[in-house]
Image (cartoon, helix red, strand yellow):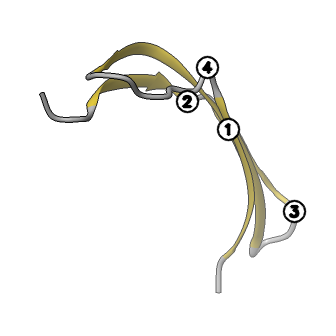
Amino acid sequence: MLPGGRLIYLSPGITVAVQSSWKIYSFIQVPLYQQVNELQLTPKWNFSIGINRSL
């Protein structure tokens, strides 16, 4: 069997405009379904935060 699997995540998030060209964003990923082949590590959740600038 090949490594890999099937994962479905729910990813709610928020984006806030700091200025007209700058935005701050964050989101959390929570797994709704995980089916992996063989022995693999899977996270209980993921959190991301970042800054975006449009030119």
Query: Looking at the image, do the residues carrying marks 3 and 4 touch, with CB atoms under 8 Å apart?
Result: no
User: Measuring 65% from the left and 78% from the top, which residue is drawn there?
Assistant: 54
What whole-number distance in Å separates the C-alpha atoms at marks 1 and 2? 6 Å
Q: Is residue 40 left or right of residue 43?
A: left
- On the image, numbered disc 2 is attached to which residue? 11
Checking the image for residue 18, the label placed there is 3
Badge 3 or badge 4: first in the primary sequence:
3
Badge 3 or badge 1: first in the primary sequence:
3
Q: Is residue 36 left or right of residue 13?
A: left
What whole-number distance in Å separates the C-alpha atoms at marks 3 and 4? 31 Å
Q: Amino acid at mark 3?
A: Val
User: In x, y percent, where is residue 5?
Assistant: 27, 27
Which quadrant of the structure image shows residue 46?
top right
User: Measuring 75% from the left and 75% from the top, which residue is drawn there?
Assistant: 21
Badge 3 or badge 2: first in the primary sequence:
2
User: In x, y percent, where is residue 20?
Assistant: 78, 72
What whole-number distance in Å separates the C-alpha atoms at marks 3 and 1? 17 Å
Q: Amino acid at mark 4?
A: Lys
What whole-number distance in Å separates the C-alpha atoms at marks 2 and 4? 13 Å
What whole-number distance in Å separates the C-alpha atoms at marks 3 and 2? 22 Å
Badge 2 or badge 4: first in the primary sequence:
2
Checking the image for residue 27, the label placed there is 1
What whole-number distance in Å separates the C-alpha atoms at marks 4 and 1? 14 Å
Badge 4 or badge 1: first in the primary sequence:
1
Q: Is residue 32 left or right of residue 20?
A: left
Query: Looking at the image, do the residues carrying marks 1 and 2 touch, with CB atoms under 8 Å apart?
Result: yes
Q: Amino acid at mark 1?
A: Phe
User: In x, y percent, where is residue 41?
Assistant: 49, 28
Callout in the foreground (3, 2): 2
- On the image, numbered disc 4 is attached to which residue? 44
User: Measuring 35% from the left and 24% from the top, which residue is drawn there?
Assistant: 7
Near-viewer residue (37 or 29): 37
